[in-house]
Amino acid sequence: RLFRDEIWAKKLDSGFITVEQAKQEFIAKGVPHAKEVAWFLDHIEEMSVPRQKVWDRVTALKQKGYHIYLLSNYSQEMFEKHTKGADFLDVLDGGVISYQVHALKPHREIYEALYQKYALNPEECLFFDDRLENVEGSKKTGMQAIQVLSEEMLCEKLDDLLK
């Protein structure tokens, strides 16, 4: 529920408020475990999960000529903390983060911002996301999409592309 709260989703990830402002709003709203929420917001860089098997496959796809883009809902502060020194950024051809365009997945605007920024044809794109609503949102814009249910499943789908 925390990530779907309007403070997080509509304000923080959309780039309209800072992490500090979000913490204050969560406290004022009286959310349960506000201190833990504040700690989480301040220490997002500690929440990353290494997925080397996935990124090995993504790198192989890149070497085969695929273009790789990131499309994510994230506040600027948290994105910068979470990705500081992240090797996977070197594989990317680009990306759009929600705070940059003040739009969130699954809304049409964020997908269209990606298409416009990189002159992409949505029919030639394949989108992976763990949330069904984001997969459905991308499909509404003409993109092919797959809901990721596990790391193993994602690796299988990427292996299929590598064949």
Image (cartoon, rainbow, N blue to C red):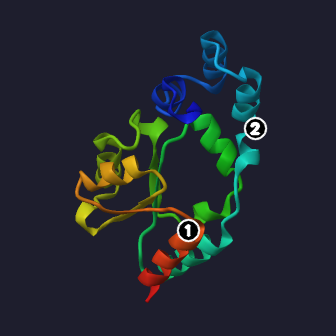
Q: Looking at the image, which residue sits at the far bottom?
A: 163
* Rendered-image quadrant of the N terminus: top right
- Under mark 1, the amino acid is Val
Q: Is residue 96 left or right of residue 41?
A: left
Q: Distance between the residues labelled 1 and 2?
A: 25 Å
Percent x, y of residue 85: 71, 55
92 and 134: which one is in front? 134
Other residues around mark 2 within 10 Å, as few (<14) / some (14–19) / many (≥20)? few
**Residue plotted at (41% across, 75% down):** 66
* Dot in front, 1 or 2: 2
Report the label total.
2
Q: Position of residue 57 (x, y in %)?
A: 56, 77
Q: What x and y, as percent, mark residue 54? A: 59, 71
Residue at point 70%, 41% (across, down): 44
**72 vs 125: above or below:** above
Q: Do the residues labelled 1 and 2 touch (CB within 8 Å)?
A: no
Query: Which residue carries the number 1 mark?
Result: 91
Query: Quadrant location of residue 147?
Result: bottom left
* Secondary structure state at the residue bearing disc 2: loop
* Residue visible at 44% across and 83% down in the picture: 160
Which quarter of the rendering shows the C terminus? bottom left
Amino acid carrying label 2: it is His
Mark identifier at residue 43? 2
Category of crowding for the residue at label 1, using alpha-carbon neighbours closer than 10 angstroms: few (below 14), some (14–19), many (at least 20): some
Q: Residue 163 carries which label?
A: none
- Image coordinates for residue 108, horizontal then vertical, percent: 29, 43
116 sits left or right of 16 in the view: left
Marks 1 and 2, the one that precedes in the sequence: 2
